[in-house]
Amino acid sequence: MLNPKLKEQNMQRLAVYREGLKAMPQIHNLFFELTLRCNERCLHCGSSCGDVPSNEMTTEQWCGIIDQLKEDLGTEGYMLCITGGEPLLRKDFFEIMGHANELGFNWGMTSNGTLITEEVAQKLRDCGMKTISISLDGMPETHDAFRRTPGGWERGMQGIKNLVKVGGFQSIQVTTVVTHKNIVELDALFDVLKDIDIDSWRVINMDPIGRAKEHPELLLTKEDYKTLFEYIRNKRIAGEPVCYGCSHYLGMEYEREVRDWYFLCTAGLYTASIMVNGDITACLDIERRPEFIQGNVLKEHFKDVWENKFQIFRKDLSLENEKCRNCKEAKYCHGDAYHTWDFDNNCPQVCFKEVLFD
């Protein structure tokens, strides 16, 4: 375990820094939700993607938004993060992202990998993709059942191998959503991944959002969480490129032990999103409520919305709940993550107090 006093000092500095960010936010990650269509039907999907009406913006509209961002913000200091749904389902995907590349944008994407043939991997490199995260949620049978996609694991794995073969990317990452069912397969999956030349393995827990709310039996137990974080920490001590995601405040024992940074929910501080219909919000995993829509890029410039709105995301959620206000960890967690906050009852759906720390 890292020095507890040093960690506390760093978290105190981060709390001060966060106050400054609320006054002067800095866009680092701008998500493009190109589609809500998906060729998988994942049980945990926060956006409930699949065969759904998508109301997608046109090629011309997306390219116009990219032009506008170039004019208003330039291309340095932030990354375009392309997501869906499965972004590669758009027939104009390479036209849109090729345009972004021509203008000098850095961009990466998330994908289930099933559509990444060797030819597609080559086209991704040619149009400037820097990073990609591919989902593998356990071993083949478990993954395919979780994503309700027969053969999905095999096609996703082949997609990863095609990317590695083509090469030339800054980072190829695998992301695994850990559930009560697949947590026993972490070692087996690690054994598969260690023989593939990926850059990192991102291991995250299933959160109670989107479709996951319909499957509470898959959520991790208290014992599962302890097992998960011990597993990640031990792998990192051994020098393996394994990390936890950004999602939650983990308490003094695990902060900075399972990822390279301390917890900070970046919604509205570093992170914003342009939704499939042009609506502007913060993190796409946050519950889709009218009050969280800050504007629309078809009617106003993203820069103006980012600089003049977003106040709903630039506050401490802990102030909304008496138990959180009275918690000694509130100065570090600020109410934890926006995407798992219960806005109807003003309380966190995920809190690791009494799970990982007292």
Image: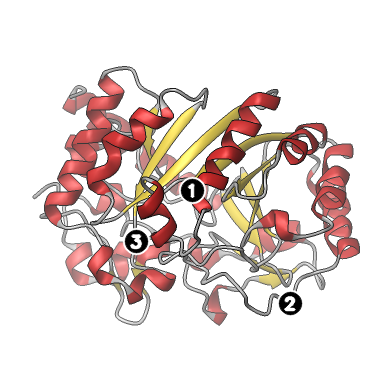
Dot label at residue 192 = none
Determine crowd level at label 1: few under 14, some 14-19, many 20+ residues with C-alpha closer than 10 A.
many
Which residue appears at 68% of the width and 80% of the height? 53
Q: Quadrant of residue 15?
A: top left
The image shows residue 64 at horizontal and vertical percentages of 89, 58
Q: Element type at marker 2?
A: loop
Determine crowd level at label 3: few under 14, some 14-19, many 20+ residues with C-alpha closer than 10 A.
many
Front-most of residues 182 and 171: 182
Q: Is residue 105 left or right of residue 1?
A: right
Pointer 3: what residue?
207
First along the sequence among labels 2 and 1 = 2
Callout 3 amino acid: Asp
The answer to whether the residue labelled 1 contacts the one labelled 3, judged by CB atoms less than 8 Å apart, is no
Front-most of residues 65 and 201: 201
**Res 260 seen here:** no
First along the sequence among labels 3 and 2 = 2
Q: Element type at marker 1?
A: helix
Q: Quadrant of the N terminus?
A: top left
Up the image or down, 32 lies above or below 176; here it is: below
Q: CA distance from mark 1 to mark 3?
A: 22 Å
Pointer 1: what residue?
153
Q: CA distance from mark 2 to mark 1?
A: 29 Å
Callout 2 amino acid: Asn
Between marks 1 and 3 in the image, the one whose residue lies nearer the viewer: 1
The image shows residue 105 at horizontal and vertical percentages of 78, 39
Q: Is residue 347 left or right of residue 112?
A: left
Pointer 2: what residue?
55
